[in-house]
Amino acid sequence: MNTMKSSTPEHDLAERAARRESFTTVSGRPIAPLYTPAEVAGLDYERDLGDPGEFPYARGIHATGYRGKLWTMRQFAGFGTPEETNARYAQLLAAGGTGLSVAFDLPTLMGRDPDHELSLGEVGKCGVNVTSLADMEALFDGIDLGAVTTSMTINSPAAMIFAMYLVVAEKQGVGWQTLSGTIQNDILKEFIAQKEYIYPPRPSMRLVTDVFAFCAEQVPKWNTISVSGYHIREAGATAAQELAFTLRDGIEYVQYGIDAGLDVDAFAPRISFFFNSHSDFFEEIAKYRAARRIWARVMRDRFGARSPRSWQLRFHAQTAGVSLTAQQPYNNVVRTALQALAAVLGGAQSLHTNSLDEALALPTAEAATLALRTQQIIACETGVANVVDPLGGSYFVEALTRELEEEALGYFERIDAMGGMVEAIERGYPQKEIAESAYRFQQAVERGEKVIVGVNGFVEPDEEPIGTLYIDHTVGEKQRARLADVRARRDEAAVRAALGRLQDNARGRANLMPLLLEAVRAYATIGEMCDALRQVWGEYEEVPVI
Amino acid sequence: MAKIRVVIAKPGLDGHDRGARVIARALRDAGMEVIYTGLRQTPEQIVTAALQEDADVIGLSILSGAHMHICPAVMTLLREKGLGDVLVVVGGIIPDVDIPRLQEIGVPGIFLPGTPMQEIVDFIRKHVRTRVESA
């Protein structure tokens, strides 16, 4: 090893020219070569940053950061039958996971029973299939709902699935007042990005606010919504667009809650957020810090919220699924670790790390464990959790935080001018903005301006395939058999009566949660409950444009 | 020479349409005539669209794992309607074990995440039937 001796001390030579004409983030944001006090002039510490735990919370919502409590390591999981997923949960809890996070399959997410035509081949594939209370009981068999916190990624039929969870708690003898967890319940980002909508925007928003009102009284520790930028980003948005559209969705929910007659401080503290953690390290950290500052000011100044808990933006982060590659899949472990580190340095309250095989299939048990270990290594070995907001005051990070904030506020103005987010969605505005960004990024990759290791750089010709989880078609058969069994054993007249009352009240203004609970207790299926409301409200259809 | 006509479809219940939209634009920019069906199309709807649009190519975007149910249904219907010469390509999350199975039923082009757009454009140009042959 004599390379050290023979190498030229290049730093002694003349100043080098830049390697490229311009340097940009993964979102295409130009980055200056150096940031100095000049870039943060005008930034006032008390007004714009504040100590951690102090308004406007740019440095975090907890004075003690992760010293008081580490983030929750919450691994999203679900596949196949409720029994298979129940076993995966047992394994994740035994491995030191500290919360559950349910991934549902597409029939469940779209409010279709497994015997519906469009459920062909989809049952249990992207998540666990939950059709009736019988499935929810099997999913949480042996898990004390009073002792775990559960996050459920469910949107259009969020109220129906939440009703099933509440009835399982009831059967376990766990009081609703003590239940803690989250339902995603964020329909706006479905119209914008993930496209798992059922009803048109306005009745969909009513279901959301019914959950807000019901929980404010009956399930006070439950996070009634997780306003999600994750899917917006995965669909191709830039970091600033993710920030802007997510927070503007949050504003829309608060406005609809107030318009429904709720006191802002009665429901706003239960609003949580969910952001992507993408590959551009500092831009992501700046995004989280900007999100907290914007939200605090919006809640205090736009809505007049008085409770600090309404001002504090709490968020879950997930590493960027879209950044994972099918090529050289072990590289994904490294990508995920760096993305997770950004989320931690940005002050996430909970975190999911993706598994290395997710560009190929749902993760194997081994891959899911490695993803959890990645978080544990960050928490226990790197020392980053020892100090609160270690990057606060960095010229670069503070300048980037302010830039992202300004760009988001510009989007707020445009969307407010359209009348609000529901109106903007109806015009297809955020959808078009995101599609444009997605295409621009793809072109940058094609031109080689953005290098993705293993894809358009450092390519290996003959790769050995890795073993992946394979979900066979018998899941569909099993779930259809269980559905037939549930239908044979339940009191059909009670189901019809409950669904009839649900429809009657959907035409009026009563809160629908108690009626959904009644239908769930009678073992009405998700397809039956959603169909009952489809008949009243109709279905949303997007005009396909490219 | 007539433009290559492509129907891009999202079958099944999945709504993740980033890939479908990006490839639709890339094929259009490459000079092809692209028809995007939108979301939640049944195999019948997709084949009907291909028939009505006189498509040379059907591109299916499937990320949900339902490909082994959807692709055979599309291929059977195409043959029944006399459209056996339409080139069918699939993009999405497809496990390795399923790739030979899809090729066996007549889906020659299978593109996983990270595939360069140009590779798909080139594949279609190379494998599509020519308009002259089909006339």
Image: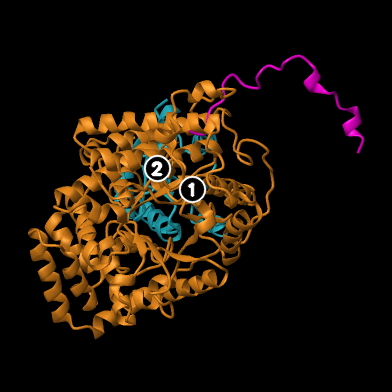
Question: Pointer 1 indicates a residue of which chain?
Answer: A
Q: B97 left or right of A18? A: left
Residue A310, numbered label? none
Residue A487 in sight: yes
Residue B6 in sight: no
Instruction: Tell me the amino acid under the disc marked 1.
Output: Gly
Chain letter matching colour cyan: B
In this rendered view, identify the residue nearer to me: A534 or A214.
A214
Chain letter matching colour orange: A
Separation of residues labelled 2 and 1 (CA atoms):
10 Å
Residue A325 coordinates in the image, percent (x, y): 57, 46
Q: Which residue is mark 2?
A: A292
Disc 2 residue crowd, few under 14, some 14–19, many 20+, Cα 10 Å: many
Magenta-drawn segment: A1-28
Q: B57 left or right of A245? A: right
Residue A507 coordinates in the image, percent (x, y): 8, 59
